[in-house]
Amino acid sequence: MFSETSCIPESFCYNNICMLEVHIIINLIYTENDGDVMFRRFMYGRYGTDKLNLAMVVLVVALSLLNSLLFAIFESSVLYSLLSSVYGVLLFFSIYRMLSRNIAARRAENQKWLNFCKRLRDRDNRYFRCPHCRQRVRVPRHKGKISIRCPKCGEKFIRKT
C-alpha cells in the first residue's frame, strides 16, 4: 500500500511523479531564500541597525540633497567636495557600526544618543549631576534657585533651574 521510500500511499504517487513534484517544490522554497540565509549567516554576531544608525542615514540623505541643491545654485566644487566628504564619513561610520562585532560599545553609543534625544524632548525638567556621587537628578524647570537633595547619597546642593 505504501511505497518503500515515502509515507505517501502508492495510489497518490503515480510512478513517483508525486515525490518528484514535492522535491521540486522544496528545492524552489530553499533556493528562493538562499540569499536571505547567506545574509543572516553573515550578520550573525554583528550589531545591525538601531536608532543612531537611522538618524545618521537620514542625515546623510538630507546632506546629499542639500549638497545637490547648493551645487546647482552656486556651482562651487569646494563646497560640493566638503559636504560630500562629510556625508561620506557619516555613511562610512553608519556602515561600520552596523557591521561591527563589538556589540557592547555600539549599544553604549546608541544609549547615549537615546538619552540625548530624551533630554531634547523633555522641556519641563532640567537635569543636574550630584557633585558628590555624580548621580543624575531631574528637577522641574523655572522654579528659580532651589535646594536639590540627591536621592542616591542624600547630598544637598543648590542650583538655578
Image (tube, rainbow, N blue to C red):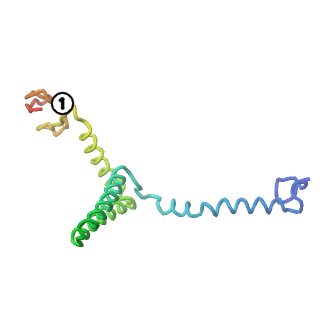
Q: Name above or below for residue 149 compared with residue 105.
A: above
Quadrant of the rendered structure where residue 127 is? top left
- Say which element carries label 1: strand
Which residue sits at x=89%, y=60%? Answer: 14
Give, as a three-letter code, the residue at label 1.
Val
Front-most of 80 and 157? 80
Which residue sits at x=24%, y=40%? Answer: 119
- Residue 105 in the figure: left or right of residue 3: left
- Residue 132 in the figure: left or right of residue 84: left
Quadrant of the rendered structure where residue 79 is? bottom left
Q: Name above or below for residue 107 compared with residue 63.
A: above
Q: Residue 107 at x, y = what percent?
A: 34, 50
Q: Residue 101 at x, y = what percent?
A: 38, 60
Q: Name above or below for residue 22 compared with residue 135.
A: below
Front-most of 69 and 51? 69
Q: Which residue is mark 1?
A: 139
- Residue 21 in the figure: left or right of residue 65: right
Q: Residue 17 at x, y = what percent?
A: 84, 62
Q: How many marks?
A: 1
Residue pushed farthest front?
73
- Residue 46 in the figure: left or right of residue 105: right
Which residue sits at x=30%, y=47%? Answer: 111
Q: Residue 146 at x, y = what percent?
A: 9, 27
Front-most of 66 and 99? 66
